[in-house]
Image (cartoon, grey):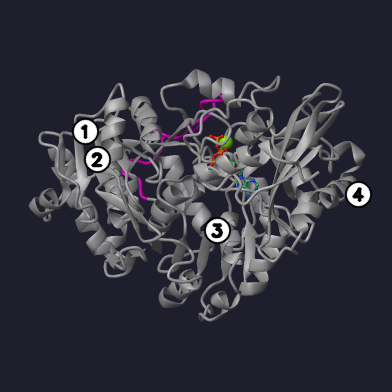
Amino acid sequence: MRYEQFHQRSIDDPEGFWAEQAQAIDWHVPPRTILDDSDPVFRKWFVGGQTNLCHNAVDRHLAERADQLALVAISTETGITREISYRELHREVNAFAATLLELGVTRGDRVVIYMPNIAEAVFAMLACARIGAIHSVVFGGFASHNLAMRIDDARPALLIAADAGMRGGKVIPYMPLVAQALAEAEHPPAKVLVVNRGLDPAYVPVEGRDHDHAALRAAHLDADVSVTWLESNEPSYILYTSGTTGRPKGVQRDVGGYAVALALSMWAIYDVRPGQVMFSTSDVGWAVGHSYNVYGPLIAGATSILYEGLPTSPDAGIWWRICERYGVRTMFSSPTAVRVLKKHDAHWLQDADLSQLQYLFLAGEPLDEPTAQWIGDALSKTVIDNYWQTETGWPVLCLMPGLDMKPVKPGSPGLPAPGYRLRVIDEATGEDAAVGEKGVLVIQPPLPPGCMSTIWGNDERFVAGYFSHFREPLYSSLDWAIRDADGYAFILGRTDDVINVAGHRLGTREIEEAVATHGDVAEAAVVGIHDELKGQVPVVFVTLKPAAAAGSVETVGAALQQCVCDQLGAVARPAQVHVVGLLPKTRSGKLLRRSLQALAERRDPGDLSTLEDPAALEEVRRVLAGPVAA
Ligand code: ATP
Ligand code: MG
């Protein structure tokens, strides 16, 4: 079917459209009502339907694909690869679910999972889903304060952790961080289930608090834990957003709508069918990990590849050899990861036999054209940008090669995904922006299945944060966009990333793109700082390519000012240009502009708990104290 018809039907007849899509999953009790939008903000999908994510991801496939691989968990840190069939996955998940029950976890209880990207994290998630417990996975790279904040918000009955993770060959003990977080939290769980990988010799179980996963697993290896059927709108999990713009929000997801949306996205967007292989390089701690390392591929009866390690270790060919080995059809990664690979020779990508690989999907941050171009050329595969948010759980903008592939337009994440009624709204007038004009990207309610139900425990923040920006109750993405005449959207940055120079509103992203056209620039971050005369002026931070000409640090400032003036006009001329070795980013690879801006204005950089590498901020401080490149 053509994309246009498919999407139009999802808008014109949402109930008919989603009733059909709902047939892709198993229902214990079919839904009574497909959509209840009596309250447009708190809409409900598949009301009265009873289902279970674990059943749909695991049990359902036993009849036809018990011996097919469900999960391949590869660690280049420990050197261990585990190939797990659907039959084995079923056994592990049952043992894990029995363990949770023994530890007193029941339906509706929260379980915080603080683990590296390993198979047990997946077992833990699925086991929670099986018994109706609500998991909240906290990215294993977060420090104790982040963990404590999330514990206090979710108030879990149990914490599941590993003794340690590994990164670049270095063991990172988790249990000291767990201990600190439990001490800091006001509502710490009494019990910790520890998956002891034997990586941290210093780990000693805490009497009365810690429970050993291996022992409990052995005791329950033949357990048969019946599935707890949940009403479609009950919470399945809580996942906190990256915290790029402020305090993370606990995104609450439902059960039935999520399963149906993922099932549709797997074939229509990612073009992965039962028995095929998907490799997402994400961590289970992120939204992509939840949807496309765990639930999506498994609901589809596909094989999911989970990877613990660096993209460049043992060398930059590792991901592509994995693609060859397992016949990966669809790969999913981030622009940040591609930029890391780009520092290495393209031959690493070409040495592997990639004949099975069809697509590389990238998401999570803007995909700049040089990066897209480089990886597209290096792989000779279709590179597809897709835009979404933790809140939506699956793409908002994408191309749909499994249905009807439309041309890639560089710089655009594509067209609205099914069920999304997208509009671009002029911020000042609240009216729809004309083609080619910039506005706020919004979703006209009802949000399609799969999108967040609310912010955990905070309906008011959900309404105030997302639905209160315009006269009508529209869901604001908080991102700027324009749409072209073919309906393709271009994301221009976040609505709080705007610089107001003498009354001209400039997107930081536009200036960054202008700067990035200079051949020596590897990456750029632009912020606005206070200026007595103009209100705000742009300040540029750049990293240079390793091959940048000697002496460019001295000359690049003036050259970049010129680049910006040529492309955007003199009003956008950067007041300062700073060359740094590293830009401050969140753990999920997003630029922390708010901290850069604070430092450039000599203010406190604020909450740094999501910062990836404190050295980046130190360097910014140092550079700001020294001479300015322009
Ligand atoms: P927080 O909401 O806590 O500040 P965050 O917005 O970074 O954090 P995520 O949900 O992980 O948390 O990120 C979603 C955001 O990432 C989008 O709103 C958008 O700004 C950006 N983004 C994601 N994919 C793309 C893409 N393909 N192109 C451009 N921007 C993207
Ligand atoms: Mg956000």
Gap in angstroms between the C-alphas marked 3 and 4: 31 Å
Most foreground residue, 396 or 309? 309
| Residue 181, numbered circle | none
Q: Residue furthest left?
A: 219
502 sits to left or right of 610 = right
Q: Is residue 33 magenta?
A: yes
238 sits to left or right of 94 = right
Q: Secondary structure at mark 4?
A: helix
| Residue 131, numbered circle | 2
- Residue type, label 2: Ile
Q: Residue at x 28, y 37 (%)?
A: 178
Q: Is residue 31 above or below residue 68?
A: above
Which sits earlier in the primary sequence, circle 4 or circle 1?
1
How many residues crowd around disc 2 within 10 Å: few (fewer than 14), some, or many (20 or more)? many
- Residue type, label 3: Ala
The magenta-colored residue range is 26-47
**Residue corresponding to mark 1:** 106
- Residue type, label 4: Asp
Nearest to the eye among marks 4 and 2: give it: 4
Q: Is residue 574 magenta?
A: no
**Residue corresponding to mark 3:** 337
Which sits earlier in the primary sequence, circle 3 or circle 4?
3
Q: Residue at x 45, y 21 (%)?
A: 458
| Residue 566, numbered circle | 4
Most foreground residue, 605 or 21? 605
Which sits earlier in the primary sequence, circle 1 or circle 3?
1
Q: Residue at x 56, y 40 (%)?
A: 618
